[in-house]
Amino acid sequence: MQAALGSVPLAMGIPGGEIILAVVVLSIVVTAPIGLLAIQMLGPRLLDAPEVS
């Protein structure tokens, strides 16, 4: 979603559109690995199925 919206200011010719796009790309590059690690570490703990007796 961020990548799709990040290019809109650049396409509209808004001053600073290149900076906005660069910040969007940087935020994706930084947060994607953090999200991956959080899912890998917390996923099994939070998604354990209850035992049926």
Image: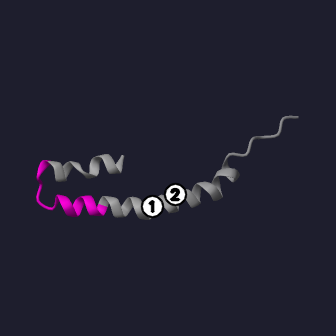
Residue ID at (39%, 58%): 28
Q: Give the labeled residue for mark 1.
A: 31
**Considering depth in this image, is 41 or 29 the residue closer to the camera?**
29
Residue ID at (31%, 58%): 24
How is the model colour-coded? Answer: one colour
Q: Is residue 43 left or right of residue 23?
A: right
Amino acid under disc 1: Thr
Question: Which quadrant: the C terminus?
Answer: top right
Q: Is residue 31 left or right of residue 15?
A: right
Q: Position of residue 16 (x, y in %)?
A: 15, 62
Membership of 18 in magenta stretch: yes
Membership of 49 in magenta stretch: no
Q: Position of residue 41 (x, y in %)?
A: 64, 59
Amino acid under disc 2: Gly
Q: Is residue 12 left or right of residue 26?
A: left
Q: Give the labeled residue for mark 2.
A: 35
Magenta residues, dominant SS class: helix
- Asked if 13 appears above or below 53 in the picture, the reply is below
Query: Could you tell me if the residues under marks 2 and 1 are in contact, i.e. CB atoms within 8 Å?
Result: yes
Q: CA distance from mark 2 to mark 1?
A: 6 Å
Q: Is residue 29 left or right of residue 6?
A: right
- Asked if 25 appears above or below 43 in the picture, the reply is below
Mark count: 2
Q: Position of residue 38 (x, y in %)?
A: 58, 59
Tell me if mark 2 has few (under 14), some (14-19) or many (20+) residues whose alpha carbon lies within 10 angstroms of its own.
few
- Asked if 2 appears above or below 34 in the picture, the reply is above
Tell me if mark 1 has few (under 14), some (14-19) or many (20+) residues whose alpha carbon lies within 10 angstroms of its own.
few
For label 1, the SS is helix
Label at residue 22? none
Which range is magenta?
12-23
